[in-house]
Amino acid sequence: MTDAPAPYLALALQCRCDAINAAPGPTEARSLMMAAILRLRAMILAAKGFIGSDLKLVVLPEYVLTGFPMGDSAAGWVTKAALHPDGAEYLALGEIARAADIHLAGNAYEQDDNFPGFYFQTSFLIGPDGRILLHYRRLISLFSPSPYDVYDRYVALYGKDSLFPVADTPLGRIAAIASEEILYPELARGLALRGAELFIHSSSETASPMPTAKNIAKQARAIENLAYVVSANTAGIAGINIPTASTEAGSKIVDYRGLVLAEAGYGESMAACAEIDIAGLRRYRSRPGMGNLLARQPLALWHDAYDCQEIHPVNGLLDQNGTPQPPPAGFFPKRQREVIARMESAGLI
């Protein structure tokens, strides 16, 4: 464990996503992605100049370079939109972190040489030296492949620790939660039990002046795990037929007591900026009392409760020989219907 850092400022940067779906080919799509990175560089450097040198962490929205696949095949989206771990886009993002002297977090679709034809949605954290410190591939997704779908092969290659990574950084112990995964308390708890003190949450979600499930969940995950949540939403997605402002507003920072410290309204904004006090969090976690929920967890009970059912099948994209197979058209809706039928058979519906 690192020594507790001095208090610092974090920013959930709410910025527009320019979708690449209409790009006629990979060359044009990659050009749009690099243009988005240049635009982000200017915004981040300007925010750093305005906020000051205490700004140490910037979190970007979900799939901010590309938007999401709409009608693209898995193989087509890999070619068009998925970053390579050693590719030009990550190098350019690393240059932003270096230039601004920040830890830069975000989310992108990523390819993997060990899984040809696959893309994984990946949350990342880049240090001020440009190196990737955290690399988390989304585990729960309705329409994208995940490591769970190729679990045996993935774990054989990367080990179980790769599924729930936590980075011990000068800013504290940081883990990533992608988009709607904030709705799953098990994921956040699994990361907290590996030491996570701050969740970077890249999202692109429906905004509303009414309470939304995700916004409620952000506070709940913070309270349950005595952890900060730095959640960045898009300021709309341009370039697709969905109304642009459907996914914007509400970027926020929540502290380990569940208090919203800062929140952005509509439009591109750096309003979701607040102080992170890891030393205070550690004091709170060390204090006996009813509020120390982590210390009061009877984990063995939950193991028994979850061990009685298997609803969502593992290794859904491995063939009988254990070879990864990219998802065919219609795979994900078909699988969900099968899961719901399994729930009916188990008496859960």
Image (tube, rainbow, N blue to C red):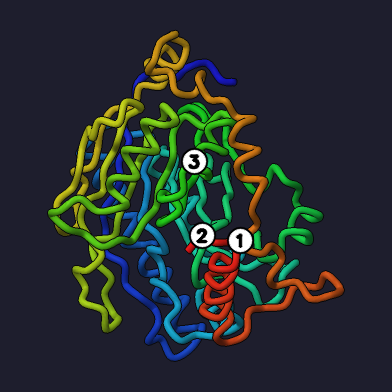
For residue 188, the mark is 3
Residue 348's mark?
Answer: 2
Mark 3 vs 2: CB contact within 8 A: no
At label 3, which amino acid type do we have? Ala
Q: Real-space Cα distance between discs 2 and 1?
A: 10 Å
**Residue 170, image x and y in percent?**
50, 26
Task: Choose top left, top right, bottom left or bottom right for residue 154.
Answer: bottom right
Residue, disc 1: 311
227 on left or right of 148:
left
Identify which residue is drawn at 49% across, 41% down: 188
Residue name at image x 48 percent, y 58 percent: 92
Mark 1 surroundings: few (<14), some (14-19) or many (≥20) residues within 10 A: some
Vertical relation: 345 (above or below) 199? below
Residue 2 position within the rendered picture, expressed as x and y whole percent measured from the top left: 56, 20
Tell me how far mark 3 sits from mark 1, CA to CA. 20 Å
Is label 1 in a helix, a strand or a loop? Answer: loop
Q: Nearer the viewer, residue 100 or 329?
A: 329
| CA neighbours of label 3 inside 10 A, class few (<14), some (14 to 19), many (20+) | many
Badge number at residue 32: none
The mark nearer the N terminus, 3 or 1, is: 3
Please tell me which residue is depicted at 53% across the width and 63% down the height of the picture. 121
